[in-house]
Structures are given as C-alpha cells and as structure tokens.
Image (spheres, rainbow, N blue to C red):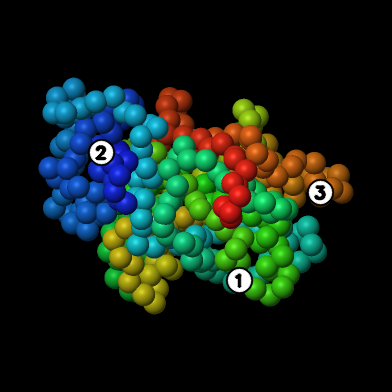
Amino acid sequence: MKLATRRDGTRDGALLVVSRDLRRAAPAAAIAPTLQAALDDWAALAPRLAALAAALDAGRAEGAVALDLAGLAAPLPRAFGFIDSSVHLNHMELARKLRGAMMPEAYRREPLMSLRMSAPFLAAGDDLVLPPGDVGLDIEAEVAAIVDDVEAGTPPERAGARIRLLTLVNDVSLRTVFAREVAEGKTTYHGKVGAALAPVAVTPDELGAAWTGGAIALRLRCTINGQLLGEPDAATDMAFDFPRIVAEACARRPLPAGTVIAAGTVSNRDRAAGSACIAERRMLETLDHGAPRTPWLAAGDEIRIEMLDSAGRSVFGAIAQRVVAARPGQA
C-alpha cells in the first residue's frame, strides 16, 4: 500500500491512503489520524489500512478524492529519528581519490552512520532555500526505510522485518560549508540542511520483484532544469543492504517507531549511470579535466528526483523542488 500525509494546519498532518497509480486518495482518520500513529500500532492497524487501500484501488473507498500533490506534507513530517548511512562506496572512493586519500577499511566492514535532524522533513514540492554566500548547494538522492520499534541488538536476519515503509530522500548538502567544517576538524552540522521526502511512502510488498528483501532494484532518476544528472540503480554497488543498515543503527540502542534510515547517495561504478548528486559529477569532471564544470545549484534551478517501476510508472511520486534565494534574515 501507499501512504501519504495531507497538510491540515497541524504539525503532523492527516494520514491518507493513496492508490497505486498515485491519482486517488482516501482519508484514514478512522483507522489512524497520522502516519506516526499507524507506525506506533502497526501490527493492529496495517491490515485495516491495507483493506482501505484495496477498496481505493477497486473504486469502493468512501470519501476518496483526487490526490492533490501540492497539498501533501512529507509522509512523516516529524520523525523520531533520521539516520543517514553511506553504503554506496563508489561515492566515497571518488572523493578520496580526488584528494589522494585511501578509503578507511572500516567502511567496508560496517555501514557508516550519521545522525541528521529529524524534523521537520520538507514536502516533496517545498522550495529549496539557497542560503547567502558561497555554500555549494547540492542535492543527494537517496532511498530510505521507515521502521517501527526495533530492539537494541537486533541482528540483520530479524532487522529486515522491522522495515515497514520505503521512500525517497533529498538529503540536501551545503558542500562548501561541509568541506570547511571537515578541514577545521568540526562536525558537519552546518553542512546539512532540511531534507525532503517523496510524496508517498510504500510498503515493501508494493514494489513486487523490485524489492530484493534488502534493496530496491530500480533506477533513481535525477534531473536539474530538465537535464539528466543521472539514473543510477539503487540496488547496484550497495556494500550493505537495508537489514544490515538497520541492524547497525540499533546495535547499541533501540530505535523507536518512526525512525527514518537512509542508505546514502546512490552511486554506481558504471559511469554511464550518471550521478545522484552534483558533487559526484564535479569529482568525475575534475578527475577527467582537472577542474569541475558543473555549477552548484543557483536560485531558479529546478530539481527532480523520481523512481520509476519497470512499466515507467512513478513509485513514490517525484521530489520536485525549486531553488529560491533566502529572504533577508532567513538562513
């Protein structure tokens, strides 16, 4: 099934069940008022939500309306946690090759984990604010899992069963700020700003054969101003799958229901696949030509991140954001 959140003036919005073709939606308030409420009691509520989804696809759902993408918030506007991993090692290998450094062997032994600000997530169509100065605004297209409660120490063979939903993330980066923080030995707190989620989150079974049990074997298409940046395959060249990532995230602490866990920027070793962020494109240009040629995002640019199934249908809806200059006093 596919789930979304309608903006209703509250912080957490109102839960919707969405049709497979992303054209219709039905309110789910009689089952769960919000997605977080559904995740809090998933075992009891998921079958009822699935029944509503089946009725919606059959044209029998009471109160169904045309899906208003512009009226959606992020599926989970306020998550209880946002953890970002980096398991597409090609991305990190390129960065280190550029500066003559070796990849730490630890990255091949276990997933790298980083904590992100978990609220609020931007909606898929919200503006992408460009802060003043030289910040290096960049997209990072990623796949993320949303889990329910996971006990500390849950092994990979059981952690996969705690994945309830999957979605896409634009984990926005300020590359110039990020690089300066690293050079000064600081954390990268200021180099990461508000991330956006795709319009809908889907249960793994909704993906059919594209869900391998640990990854989504579909291409993640990224464009800037209509020009293709890349469409790497989200399952290719993953050093660790999602059950392993979830297990690493809960190794020493429990994860509450509503934790979002991303797998990092999708990156394939095959250059023909292109890139899911500008930084990687610039790395390749520098290696090939001695200097980058692709600029960072500027005011007026439009980005689109979307995953299509084997029939060319959008799985999660598109993250489609326009870059706008920060207003005076807006960081």
Residue 310 vertical position relative to residue 266 in the rendered view, above or below: above
Q: Is residue 196 left or right of residue 159?
A: right
For label 3, the residue is 286
Q: Residue at x 24, y 49 (%)?
A: 34
Is label 3 in a helix, a strand or a loop? helix
> Please, which residue is most extreme toward the right here?
290
> Could you tell me which quadrant the C terminus lies in?
bottom right
Is label 1 in a helix, a strand or a loop? loop
Q: CA distance from mark 2 to mark 1?
A: 38 Å
- Residue 47 shows up from this direction: no
Q: Residue at x 66, y 70 (%)?
A: 104
Quadrant in which residue 299 is drawn: top right
Residue 281 vertical position relative to residue 89 in the rendered view, above or below: above
Q: Amino acid at mark 2?
A: Leu
Along the line of sight, the residue nearer the viewer: 319 or 251: 319
Of mark 3 and mark 1, the one earlier in the sequence is 1
Of mark 2 and mark 3, the one earlier in the sequence is 2
x then y, percent, for residue 121: 43, 51
For label 1, the residue is 187
Is label 2 in a helix, a strand or a loop? strand
Q: Residue at x 29, y 24 (%)?
A: 66
Q: CA distance from mark 3 to mark 1?
A: 26 Å
Q: Residue at x 46, y 62 (%)?
A: 117
Q: Which mark is residue 326?
A: none
For label 2, the residue is 16
